[in-house]
Image (cartoon, helix red, strand yellow):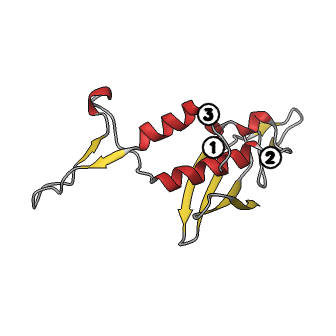
Amino acid sequence: MPPRISRQLFCTVVLTLSVISCPPAAPGQPERRRLVSPNSLPTDVTFIAEMKGGQLKAFAAAYGALQALPDLAASKKRLENYTVSFAENKDNYYITFDPRFQPLRKLPGGGFVISVGAENDFGRNVRFTVTKTDFKVIKRVTLI
């Protein structure tokens, strides 16, 4: 069973990314998609992405694994500090957490501090491999 994520986070992801396809458009007309609950959304909403349930379960497992890292500070586990990317093959999902860019900081005596490697003040660049059959994290790689 994948680790638990907050109900609010799960509902936000599901409501943001849930889409139902409309019937095929007439020839020469652009494809149209209808949001699950069109009356509850503002008219200026832009479709961002579509995710399948398995992808969301893989995300939940990977996010739970990120939260469980004992050597990562709590401030570096905040989801808003990351861009999350998804990839897959026939057996696994690959969920990558890439921390947001840390700007250069000037040193008191001159020069700059730059972030080199997999970790900065916002988080750690890490990829989790999650199986498609049981949604278990089978591998973690810290990326440089």
Circles 1 and 3, Cβ within 8 Å, touching? The answer is no
Secondary structure at numbered mark 1: strand
Q: Residue at x 18, y 53 (%)?
A: 23
Q: Please name the residue shown 64% across and 43% down the image.
A: 100
Mark 3 residue type? Ser
Quadrant of res 103: top right
- Work out whether residue 98 can be spotted: no
The three-letter code of the residue at mark 1 reads Tyr
Asked whether the residues under the numbered discs 3 and 2 touch, taking CB atoms below 8 Å apart as contact, a structural biologist would say no
For the residues carrying marks 1 and 3, which lies nearer the camera in this image? 3
For mark 2, give the secondary structure: loop
Query: Disc 2 designates what residue?
Result: 69
Name the side, left or right, on which 89 lies relative to 30. right
- Which mark lies nearer to you, 2 or 1? 2
Q: Residues within 10 Å of mark 1 (few under 14, many from 20)?
A: some
At horizontal 76% and vertical 54% (from top left) the residue drawn is 118
Q: Which residue is mark 1?
A: 82
Q: Which residue is mark 3?
A: 6
- Marks 3 and 2 sit apart, C-alpha to C-alpha, by 17 Å
Residue 84: image location, x then y, percent: 58, 49
Of the two numbered discs 2 and 1 on the same chain, state the one appearing first in sequence: 2
When asked about the image quadrant of residue 70, the answer is top right
Residue placed furthest toward the right: 109
In the image: residue 80, left or right of residue 104: left
Say which of 86 and 82 sits in front.
Answer: 86
Who is closer to the viewer here, 74 or 103? 74
Indicate whether 91 appears above or below 68.
below
Q: Is residue 76 visible?
A: yes
x and y, in percent, of residue 101 in the image: 66, 44
Q: Considering only order in the chain, which callout, 2 or 3, is on the residue closer to the N terminus?
A: 3
Q: Position of residue 75 (x, y in %)?
A: 76, 33
Task: Give amino acid for label 2.
Answer: Leu
